[in-house]
Amino acid sequence: MNELIRKLQASGFTGYESKVFLALIQGKLMSASEIAESARIIRTDVYKILRTFVRKGFCNEIETNTILKYEIIDPDIILDKIEGKIINEKEKEIKNIRDVFKEIKPLYKSKYDENEKIANVELIRGYNQHREEKFIKIFKQAKKEILFMTRPEYLVSDEIDNTAVRFIKSGGIIKSVYEASSDFKLKTKSGWKQGTLKDLMKTVENFEKYGEKVRLCTSKVPNITIFDREIVFTNINDKTVPKHNEADIITRSKNFAESMVAVFDSFWKKSFTIKEFKKKFNN
């Protein structure tokens, strides 16, 4: 019984309300004195709680020839009442916060000066979808060339794929160096599964079909993307570091970007085309 009282308290009942509720649940028509005795609390406190329960529709107050008696209603009906109240309150909270943010949105960067110089280096810390959204945003803003080096961890983001197709069709160039590894998760219709080297081959072959220039590297490859030789997006992916401590670094510097292009070119030169890789490693 103590465990039920604890659970009722966790659901919003007070300690005394929990005891009175359990006393009512187990009885039929009960007087306040009988409820107080069963719940082991004083009668004056019981009256206050019973008035609350009657108001909420948890129990019926029945007049007899001598005293008032109380009868609990069907627990399923009480549950519906409580659930309905919680849902209504949450819907109001959601509506209120949506209304507030609808008013807030026009203020977003309302005092931003477009001529103000953007910070050269931006750090995005933590494991969350906003890091991916930031990458996609920069990806969509690219105009001419994207140089991509990666150790695949998850394949494949449909949004990035579709953006890449549009970018190439509009005349953009994407050159990519993928680390030849099976240490990644592959997205399938039934969910995520452990990838294989053959899965990687099939995936990058699809990339090549829509115009991406692909190389495979047997060395460790840094997770770096260079956009238009102006922006460098670096993912600090260290498996010894907890996910929430991972970070991305966005560097907006032409000089630094050109230096990273030189790094990209060195990996590109020592990497294999898909055909060369298959021939050399019998895939």
Image: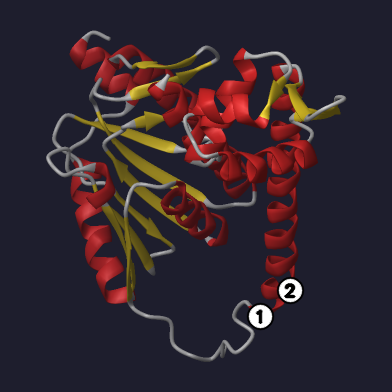
Q: CA distance from mark 2 to mark 1?
A: 8 Å
The answer to whether the residue labelled 2 contacts the one labelled 1, judged by CB atoms less than 8 Å apart, is yes
Q: Name the residue: 68% across, 40% down.
A: 86
Label drawn at residue 103: 2
Q: Position of residue 17 (x, y in %)?
A: 56, 37
Depth-wise, is mark 2 or mark 1 nearer the camera?
2
Is residue 253 positioned above or below 270 on the image?
below
Q: Quadrant of residue 218?
A: top left
Name the one closer to the observer, 147 or 182: 182
Q: Quadrant of residue 88?
A: top right
Three-letter amino acid code at the position of disc 2? Glu
Outermost residue toward the front in this view: 66
Three-letter amino acid code at the position of disc 1? Leu
Q: Write down the residue under mark 1.
A: 107
How many numbered marks are there?
2
Q: Name the residue: 43% across, 81% down.
A: 118
Is 81 on the left-hand or right-hand side of 129? right
Q: Position of residue 28 (x, y in %)?
A: 71, 13
Q: Name the residue: 79% across, 33% down.
A: 57
Helix, strand or loop at label 2? It is helix
Name the one closer to the observer, 118 or 208: 118
Position of the N terminus by quadrant:
top left
